[in-house]
Image: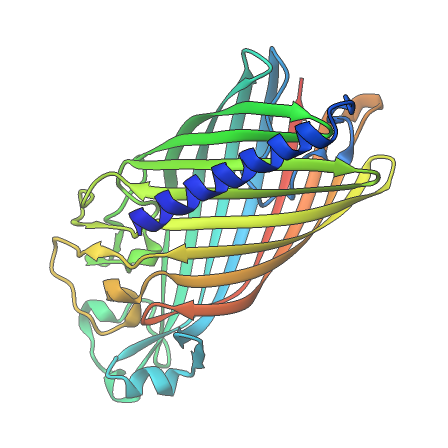
Amino acid sequence: MKNLILTVTILCGLTLNASITSADESHSSDKSKWNPGRPDSHAPIGVMGDHTHGANEYMLSYRFMSMEMNGHRQGSRSLTSADVFGLGYDIAALDMSMDMHMFGFMYAPSDKLTFMGMINFVENSMNMLHKPDQMDMGGDMDMHHHGGKMGHSSSGIGDLSIGGLYKFYDEKKQRAHLNLSVVLPTAGVEESEHGMLLPYGMQLGSGTWDLKPGITWLGQSGSFSYGAQLIATIRLEDENEAGYALGDRLDTTAWLARELMDGLSASVRLSYTKSDPIEGHFHNAQNHNSPALHEANYGGDFLEGGIGLNWQFKKGTLKGHRFAIEGIFPLDQDTNGVGMDRDYTVVAGWQFAF
């Protein structure tokens, strides 16, 4: 996976450089600049690290993301609870929700360099179903037990991310910048209930030092804007304090937006994520009677589409504020092993530049 991430990143950089060079040669007389005052000058709110700022500019932001998952799938095939039991598991997930509150800060000491940081607060919940002949297991397994069902929940501070954006191109209504951030393991990765470790997907972060390099390209043409981004996540440690490491991942996305009226724009977006399975396993003893407790059942290939709106205020008491929302829906899923079946994700946010 690391070789794939490195290869794609290099190819992306070479392709972008070639495109820019070609544009310079064929439109050298075009000196038009990027317009940051348009509502579509930012990417859809679900894209992180999408824009830089001018010298001495600050930005505060808050995003709320809610992801819903419904049952399991094996590869590209959705599974019923009976299918999961038929594969030898005693417990199947009925649904899972992950809510994340993301607080961000950006500061640009120059037109080319923007520093950024983000901290998350995570809330997870999962409802699960016992195999019929496992309904009288008793003991600690009977968490919130009622009619063969039980529920898990976890919440707390997530991982802290700090980094920067370096803008290396800003001509002919196009911009391009490099992304680089480091994720600090500030989240809990040994969350438990009733003395039992919760599944990997219910933990609050990666628990490892992670590096996130990437590249972002933006463009404007008439009332339209467009962009693309590639971000890799590379785990810098073989295991966290709990004994495992999340898989490396590659996130790519491209979007098209249109200014509908003064201060309002709409967007459509396509994204693809490739994620490796978890390596290692919990140090502490745990059973493997649920797909969520198997390391090989995490990650996969996910293709999703998004529809969003951006509101930008230029006058009055809300001047400098931006509000946005995006709905994200799965188009194709191919999980590693027996993973969770994604249903939808909603991202809403506020940004204030000054």
Name of the residue lying farthest toward the front: 25
**Camera-side residue: 325 or 98?**
325
Q: Quadrant of the C terminus?
A: top right
Q: Is residue 287 positioned above or below 195 on the image?
A: below
Q: Is residue 168 left or right of residue 74?
A: right
The residue drawn where x is 45% and y is 43% is 11
Q: Residue 265: x percent and y percent?
A: 78, 43
**Camera-side residue: 70 or 146?**
70
Q: Is residue 35 positioned above or below 293 on the image?
A: above
The residue drawn where x is 35% and y is 50% is 4
The answer to whether residue 9 is visible is: yes
Q: Is residue 85 positioned above or below 51 on the image?
A: below
The residue drawn where x is 34% and y is 68% is 336
Q: Residue 290: x percent and y percent?
A: 27, 72
Q: Residue 294: x percent and y percent?
A: 24, 66
**Camera-side residue: 340 or 221?**
221
